[in-house]
Image (cartoon, rainbow, N blue to C red):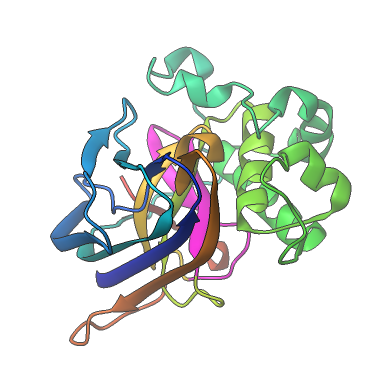
Amino acid sequence: MTFKVFSELSYQVYMPTTFLFNIEAAQTNWQTIIKEQLTTNIACPLEALVSPLGTRFIRTTINEPTDFIITYSATVTTHHQLIYEQLADTFTALSNIQPDVLPYLFSSRYCQSDKLQRFASQMFGNLVGDYAKVAAICDWIYSNIEYLLGSSKSYTSAVDTMSERAGVCRDFAHLGIALCRASGIPAKYFTGYAYQLQPADFHACFEAYINGVWLFFDATRMIPTNGLVKIANGLDAADTAVTNIFGSTFCNYITVSCNLVEDAIFKPFNAWENKEVALSYG
């Protein structure tokens, strides 16, 4: 599928401030950037950086008080892989997991899997197969956590979401990741531009490592699972924040959109509707 993505972020800058933006589409074997453009309303240096995880960052420093606007647009083609084999009984032995996957088994800042092991064992421990467990985790989150705008803060963790029983996409992803890791299944955070998301915004989901493949899951069920343009992966939101700010600013607004190109035919795929077919973003 081919999408046109757009984001614009506006800040009032009060003092010399360095920004680290994470708004560019990822460049992967499964995602092709046809064209992209990054602009600002004032002259400033824009430094392109790539993290060890492959995340594309833009670093810039604004030295004087001003209104600052950064705008990103891109046309991106995504290539998904549908996994058709029987998934319910698949199981990946921890002894066979590759070293680069192992960090996604551990507790992290927002995904305290060590504190949720008892709950995960009680709720999902009797299920056979990793895919069945992750699907059940998503079903449980969808049924028991209310999607409520404004219900969480930047510091809200998976344990907080369990307690409050409410959150936004970021919190749904963190809880899904934490419960997967507590069940012995590697999981990582996924952030991107989302087609048909209302209200339009950046969207957070997660991927779980099952039978040697990273499979995509979204416990919010707010978008078709093949309607995403990936920005970045990470242990949790700390690795993939849209903006890291070192200074003093006020955010005036953030505008985000993800639209299908006019000549494309979109056939939505929703993983939760068919437990024997999964989607991989690679």
Image location of residue 218, percent across then percent down: 55, 57
151 left or right of 204 in image: right
Looking at the image, residue 105 sits to the left or right of residue 19; the answer is: right
| Residue at the (28%, 54%) spot, across then down | 25
* Secondary structure mostly taken by the magenta-highlighted segment of the chain: strand
Using the rendered view, name the quadrant where residue 155 is placed: top right
Instruction: Point out the image quarter for the C terminus.
Output: top left
Residue 222 part of the magenta-drawn span: yes
Residue at the far right in the pictured view: 163
Residue at left offset 68%, top offset 50%: 136
Residue ID at (49%, 20%): 103
Total marks placed: 0
**Magenta residue check for 247:** no
Against 10, is 238 above or below? above
- Name the image quarter holding residue 159: top right
- The answer to which quarter of the image holds residue 51 is top left
Observer able to see residue 96: yes
Q: Is residue 275 visible?
A: no
- The x, y position of residue 82, in whole percent, is 34, 57
Screen quadrant of the N terminus? bottom left
Residue 36 sits above or below residue 85 on the image: below
Residue lying farthest bottom?
262
Task: Using the image as rendered, state which of residue 281 and residue 130 is in the foreground.
Answer: 281
Residue drawn at x 46%, y 78% is 196
Farthest front residue in view: 64
Residue 123, how many percent across, how many down? Answer: 81, 40
Q: Is residue 53 above or below residue 266?
A: above
**Residues rendered magenta in the picture:** 201-223
Position of residue 130 measured from the top left corner of the image (x, y, whole percent): 57, 37
Left or right: 9 in relation to 107: left
User: Could you say which is closer to the camera, residue 174 or residue 144?
Assistant: 174
Residue that lies at the very extreme toward the left in this rendered image? 34
